[in-house]
Amino acid sequence: PMIFILYTPIVILQKLTGFNIKPLVGLYIILLAFISLALCHALLKNILLKEDSYLKSAIILALIGIFLIVPTSDFGQREHLLCILGMPYVFAAVVRAKNNTISVMQASLIGLMAGLVFSLKPFFLIPIVLIECYLMVARKNIKSWMRIESLLMLCVMIGYITYVFMYHPLYFDVLMPLISQFYFIGNEESWHTMLFKPRVIFCFAIVVYYLLFFRKNHFHELSRVLFLSLVGFILAFIVPRSAWGYHVLPAYSIALILTVIYVYSMWSEDIKRYTLKKKEVIFIIAASFAMPVMIFSKEVDHIIRFAQFEDINALRAKIKTMPYHSIYCFSSMTTGLCFPLVTMNKKAFAGRFPLFWWVRGLRKMENKYGYNNLPVNMLRDKNFLIDSLAYDLNHYQPELIITFKEDERLFLPKGYDYPAYFSERDDFKKAWLHYQLLDNIGSFKLYRRT
């Protein structure tokens, strides 16, 4: 639920002003980014010496790129917010490791921001544990975690969990058991698929470089804390075995900052003495960031290809001409297919499932145990989910339903589509009687309510 809390200001502002929510989200993220940059800049003054001003400037420029450019299509995801609001905590840990002080106001803001974003997912706690353990060792004090920012962060997390227990108990009673049973297994990737993605390869390359080549006398505390953060964020996607682009973003961002430090460390003396020529500096930087630039180019190319996807554009054009006011989408691939259609055309999303995340895990379990031999608890949960979908159709009565046929080839038994798959439950079969096929648009089927 934390993601809803973080985006509540935007929803309230949109309702008060009536402005388009898309630019409001962009402005909100940019505002958070500049607040974080101001904090990081202030903290770096306590980390780096004046003679290393070039490195400070380079890190700030890298952070601007990480906050506003690197995320590409992952802009606004939980991991993107984590990079923005969690980065001051990482630099604050470096300041503490050097036994320097942080103002009460800065520490309080850092703790509040960290408490909010590190609560977004349980796996985000891994780097916190590694950093805090390092501080205990570095400062030789088991009570080193008792700092303003860490205590406030802990209070925010405890308050958040208490709030969810009090006001959203079904999150723990209903949603978490379903997530643990179907979500994580559904999103698990093979080790080969996960480990050979470009962003993941880059992260591991930086880890290897640190272990083999980085000299301890080069920005020891800064590089050590960043390295532990990198390891923690790598574990955050390794443990659930899911390395989607935005899942890797925090680790990738830390790896980029470490790259800046590595490059500067190798050439710092020459930089300070001005013995490096301009062409040499450009070549060094270009060579060091060749892989990130290639990764970014590939990601931008993917976005352009998706924007030019004929089926999507044809569907968008069709929706604009339709008189229907409420839409439901049957897809287990991504929310990016339906919600932009709903938002841009000022339609209502008529259901509770933003996407059928549970279908992926459910199908894996059906493949494992046999289609008709699911364990009793899984069969119970499958029936509950399909009956909930039937309830949505009866209660919200979406006027238009869009199904993505690519899903049917990837996740459903051969010869099935979503309506056929769900119709094994009588409640859904009865609810589906009110719908008939309206049109086929490439990869999409459109059904209207009669």
Image: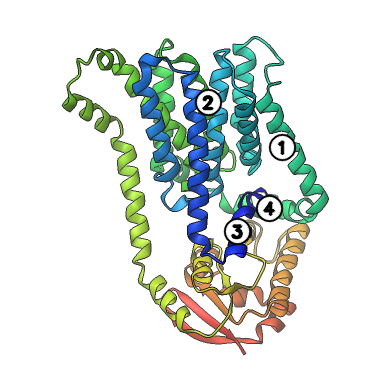
- Judge depth for marks 3 and 4 and give the one in front: 3
Image spot of residue 26 (x, y percent): 48, 53
Name the residue rendered at 34%, 22% in the picture.
54
SS for dot 4:
helix
Q: Which quarter of the rendering shows the C terminus?
A: bottom right
As shown in the figure, which amino acid type bears the numbered disc 4?
Ile
Above/below status of 215 relative to 241: above
* Residue at the disc numbered 1: 156
Secondary structure of the residue carrying tag 3 is helix
**38 versus 95 height, above or below:** below
Callout 3, which amino acid? Leu
Residue placed under numbered mark 3 in the picture: 13
User: Which numbered disc flags the more N-terminal residue, 2 or 4?
Assistant: 2
Question: Residue 11's spot in the image, x, y percent?
Answer: 61, 59
Distance, label 3 to label 2, CA atoms, is 32 Å
Residue placed most toward the observer, 346 or 450: 346
Q: Is residue 393 visible?
A: yes
Q: Residue furthest front?
A: 17
**Mark 2 Cα-neighbour bin, 10 Å: few <14, some 14–19, many ≥20:** many
Q: What residue is rendered at 61% in x and 22% in y?
A: 103
Q: Dividing the picture into quarters, in which one does residue 12 lie?
A: bottom right
Relative image position of residue 30 (x, y in whole percent): 48, 46
Q: Position of residue 351 (x, y in %)?
A: 66, 70
